[in-house]
């Protein structure tokens, strides 16, 4: 549906906007990729998962659909770190509407199926429900099944054990679990703990920044605003690399007329990691050019200079410096790679067009995120809940809930607090 305005615009030669209500969005969207399956899990006496055997068949609709059946296997492999695992998933084409994510892709559809089995094992083994999860939780030496590479991939970092420990204290698990099963009339108290996982980011996309002749830093961010303000939080990475005051930064986002680079779509919890990297490499490219311009203008080599207070400053003689605004004007005069007239060969055509549109407007920093990523990035959460359930009506009330996220580096404390 989103392609239709572009097609109509090409046919008519006029700008076209498609407006849709929320109801219409659901109407033209996709259905949930439902699946059925079986799982068998083996445990040691101490609760360690020795083996998982899992088999899933997914209704993918009339297209290839979404890879929930793959993500289910990855989820189990990372959350429980089984010593051995056999995993089979089969998508089936059906004469039904296309299937896809309706809230988020794939991994956590599996959690409501597996977590009760972990509880069942804890009861049979006589173990605490937090303890059995902790013994199987991933740490930074953990692995995840990468269905794309068909191999076990290492994790960048994982602190799920610590998240479980913090959550247990925050929730007062030892006391609250004693209330589980207490009844008053038709109402019963339930206390539980659960975990979830989602992939945390990707690499290989492009970053684009520009320093204008007035000295302002323009961060061109290809992500939108889904309410988390990550388009702004990730832009701070560029400001930090270039030693910029945030008040002197302009974020360009929201539509292609602002000349945006090729970035990953803002979905699936991938934005912060992915776009932090793209803004980092673009700002690093701009930093290198600032140092080179200072050496050309003031003498010496780029290694003789550093960045401070929005100026390029000589390490040996701070009085010898170049304001960013002047460096931007010099970049326009120098042309070539400095002004965006010459671009890297490996950037996406979308980024090439965006950077070309900015050529000659200042100092242009543009780069593809080629920093080699050797491990998977897990986002991990532990959740504790106490509810009151009416056994006659099925109505439930959440009495208390505590969630602890292994969220990595906090980019923006206020945004983090809102989330």
Image: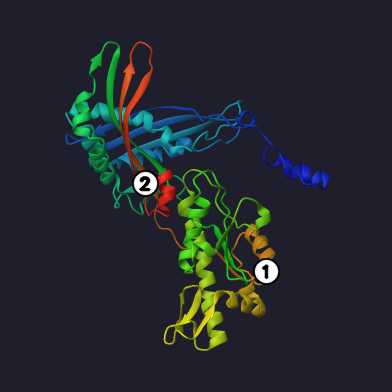
Residue 304, compared with residue 339, is above or below; it is below
Question: Where does the image place residue 216, in percent across and percent down from the top left?
Answer: 58, 67
What mark, if any, has residue 144 been given in the picture? 2
Q: Is residue 264 left or right of residue 388?
A: right
Considering the image in quadrants, where does the C terminus appear?
top left
Query: Dot 1 corresponds to which residue?
Result: 359
Residue closer to the observer: 324 or 205: 324
Image marks 1 and 2: residues in contact by CB distance under 8 Å? no
What is the x, y in percent for residue 261?
60, 58
Residue 253, placed above or below residue 89 = below
Which residue is painted at 66% across and 53% down in the image? 256
Judge by depth and name the residue closer to the eye, 184 or 222. Answer: 184
Residue 298, position as x, y percentages in the image: 54, 87
Q: Secondary structure at mark 2?
A: strand
> Residue 179's spot in the image, x, y percent?
21, 24
Instruction: Give the left or right position of residue 303, taking residue 342 as reference.
Output: left
Who's the residue at 43% across and 32% down the image? 109
Q: CA distance from mark 1 to mark 2?
A: 43 Å
> In front: 92, or 68?
68
Q: Is residue 413 above or below residue 299?
A: above
Residue 146 appears anywhere in the view: no
Q: Report the residue that reaches farthest toward the right.
A: 12
């Amino acid at each position: 549906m989103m392609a239709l305005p572009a097609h109509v615009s090409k046919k008519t030669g006029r700008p076209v906007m498609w407006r849709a209500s929320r109801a219409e969005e659901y109407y033209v969207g996709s259905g949930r990729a439902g699946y059925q399956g079986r799982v068998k899990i083996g445990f040691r006496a101490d609760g360690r998962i020795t083996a998982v055997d899992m088999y899933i068949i997914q209704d993918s609709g009339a297209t290839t659909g979404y890879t929930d059946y793959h993500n289910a296997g990855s989820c189990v492999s990372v959350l429980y770190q089984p010593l051995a695992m056999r995993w089979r998933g089969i998508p089936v084409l059906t004469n039904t509407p296309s299937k896809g994510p309706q809230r988020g892709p794939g991994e956590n559809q599996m959690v409501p199926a597996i977590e009760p089995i972990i509880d069942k094992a804890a009861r049979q083994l006589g173990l605490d429900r937090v303890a059995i999860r902790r013994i199987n939780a991933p740490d930074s030496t953990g692995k995840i099944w990468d269905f794309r590479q068909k191999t076990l991939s290492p994790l960048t970092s994982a602190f799920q054990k610590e998240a479980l420990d913090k959550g247990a204290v925050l929730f007062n698990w030892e006391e609250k679990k004693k209330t589980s099963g207490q009844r008053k009339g038709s109402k019963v108290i339930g206390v539980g703990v659960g975990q979830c996982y989602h992939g945390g980011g990707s690499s290989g996309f492009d970053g684009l920044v520009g320093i204008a002749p007035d000295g302002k830093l323009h961060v061109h961010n290809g992500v939108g605003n889904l309410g988390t303000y990550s388009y702004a939080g990730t832009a701070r990475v560029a400001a930090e690399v270039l030693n910029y005051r945030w008040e002197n930064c302009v974020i360009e986002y929201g539509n292609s007329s602002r000349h945006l680079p090729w970035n990953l779509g803002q979905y699936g919890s991938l934005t912060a990691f992915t776009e932090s990297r793209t803004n980092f490499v673009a700002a690093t490219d701009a930093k290198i050019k600032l140092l080179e311009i200072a050496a050309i203008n003031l003498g010496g080599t780029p290694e003789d200079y550093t960045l401070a207070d929005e100026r390029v400053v000589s390490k040996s003689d701070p009085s010898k410096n170049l304001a960013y605004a002047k460096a931007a004007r010099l970049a326009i005069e120098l042309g070539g790679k400095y002004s965006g007239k010459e671009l890297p060969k490996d950037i996406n055509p979308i980024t090439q067009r965006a950077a070309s549109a900015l050529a000659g407007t200042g100092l242009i920093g543009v780069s593809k995120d080629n920093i080699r990523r050797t491990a998977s990035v897990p986002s991990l959460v532990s959740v504790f809940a106490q509810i009151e359930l009416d056994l006659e009506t099925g109505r439930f009330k959440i009495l208390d809930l505590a969630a602890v996220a292994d969220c990595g580096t906090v980019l923006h404390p206020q945004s983090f607090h809102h989330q």
